[in-house]
Image (cartoon, grey):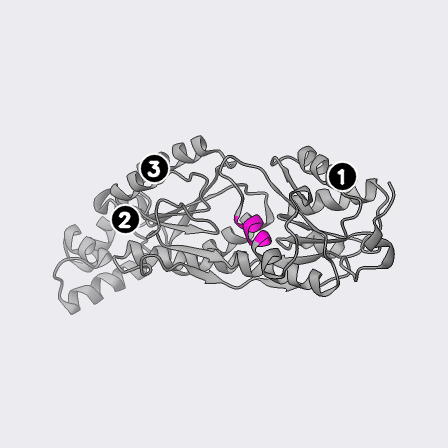
Amino acid sequence: MGGATIKDVAAAAGVGIATVSRVMSGSGPVSEATRRRVLAAAETLEYRPSALGRGLKTRRTGAIGLLVPDITDPFSAELAAGVLACARAQGCHVVLDATGEDPDVEAELLERLAEQRVEGVIAVPVRRDPRPWEALTRLGPAVVFAGRTVPGLPSAPCVLADEAGGVRSVVEYLAGLGHRRVAFLGGRGADGPAVREEAFRATLAALGLAVEEDLFARARPTADSAFAAAASLFQRRPDLTAVVAGGHRLGEAAVLAARELTLRVPADVSIAIVEDVPWSELCDPPLTAVAHPARDLGYRACELLLRASAGGAARAPGRPVVLATELMVRASCGPVTGSMRTGRPR
């Protein structure tokens, strides 16, 4: 039939509109016989309550805000897929937007989500300043961070990948192949060394390998900057034997720069990336990579958020959910050869 209104259901069940509303919302006293009569009438008439109407009455929308850096990024896309899967299973819908790694855009989007009265927000945060997040939670929405945290909010629920474990696994793998001059290609920002670079340094030190500043290169978040940083690294240190790229875009730049400089992978240089992406397996040779559980991160973050928005404890303060990463060993890394030990002429 379709198109039935609450008035139609009330007339068919022989009750008032208020009674139908109480049955549909699950609030207020209604006898079991009346409840069954109303539900039967609603089913016969194919009546569906208006989500907008419910939101206006209860000031709850059933919506979840999701903020990611870039919707075209494979990690963000997988994380969003996990959030969507969980939200749909619980009858919620997701309002998705991208910050572009811009803190001002992030602040604006937080204000918009608050105006839309979302149940909560899942975010891969940009800002290290906790104040915009504190302002949001004071308005009611719960907040759960995924993939990153905001340092000033140690008690905020979060779901993280084991970044340190992932980086450690790839550096230990390269060291086991005999590599001693391993370079790191990372991002550049105002907030100091990234988590992955810190883990890289700590692993070198734990293995008794020298931490040489000349083997670190940092790039801005553009393809041109990443390529320039990778090429400069190869040319500056012709004796390096392996590179760990701290992200898939940086890994792409390392591969392209090696090809431009006619370096053979892995005969001349081994390359590994932190963040496995579909094209990693399509490279020639396929790239060794640290795989992140992006979809699981999104799903678990959504579970925490729904629990928190329902009034439950999302997670004990200071105890994030940490999911394991996995080292995918492929053909882009090989053992150190004699020529690699002495350096290659450019």
Q: Taking 32 as reference, is 112 above or below it? A: above
Task: Tell me the residue at 62%/58% (across/down).
Answer: 290
In the picture, the disc for residue 236 is: 1
Count the marks.
Answer: 3
In the picture, the disc for residue 5 is: 2
Q: Quadrant of the N terminus?
A: bottom left
Task: Tell me the residue at 60%/49% (across/down).
Answer: 74
Q: Quadrant of the C terminus?
A: top right
Q: Is residue 28 left or right of residue 184?
A: left
Which residue is at the front of the view, 261 or 92? 261
Question: How far from the left and from the top, in percent, is residue 305?
Answer: 35, 55
Q: Crowding at label 1, few (<14), some or many (≥20) Cα neighbours within 10 Å?
A: few
Sequence-wise first label, 2 or 3:
2
Which residue is at the front of the view, 130 or 106? 130
The residues bearing labels 2 and 1 have C-alpha atoms spaced at a distance of: 73 Å
Q: Crowding at label 3, few (<14), some or many (≥20) Cα neighbours within 10 Å?
A: some
Which residue is at the front of the view, 185 or 7? 185
Q: Closer to us: mark 1 or mark 3?
A: 1
Q: Quadrant of residue 319?
A: bottom left
Question: How far from the left and from the top, in percent, is residue 340?
Answer: 83, 54
Amino acid type of the residue that numbered disc 2 sits on in the rendered structure: Thr
Question: How far from the left and from the top, in percent, is residue 189?
Answer: 54, 36
Magenta stretch, residue numbers: 195-201
The residues bearing labels 1 and 3 have C-alpha atoms spaced at a distance of: 42 Å
Task: Judge whether residue 198 is colored magenta.
Answer: yes
Amino acid type of the residue that numbered disc 3 sits on in the rendered structure: Pro
Q: Is residue 154 left or right of residue 35?
A: right
Q: Under tag 3, what secondary structure?
A: helix
> Where does label 3 land, which residue?
132
Q: Is residue 276 left or right of residue 22?
A: right
Task: Judge whether residue 127 is colored magenta.
Answer: no
Instruction: Inspect this view and state whether residue 85 appears.
Output: no
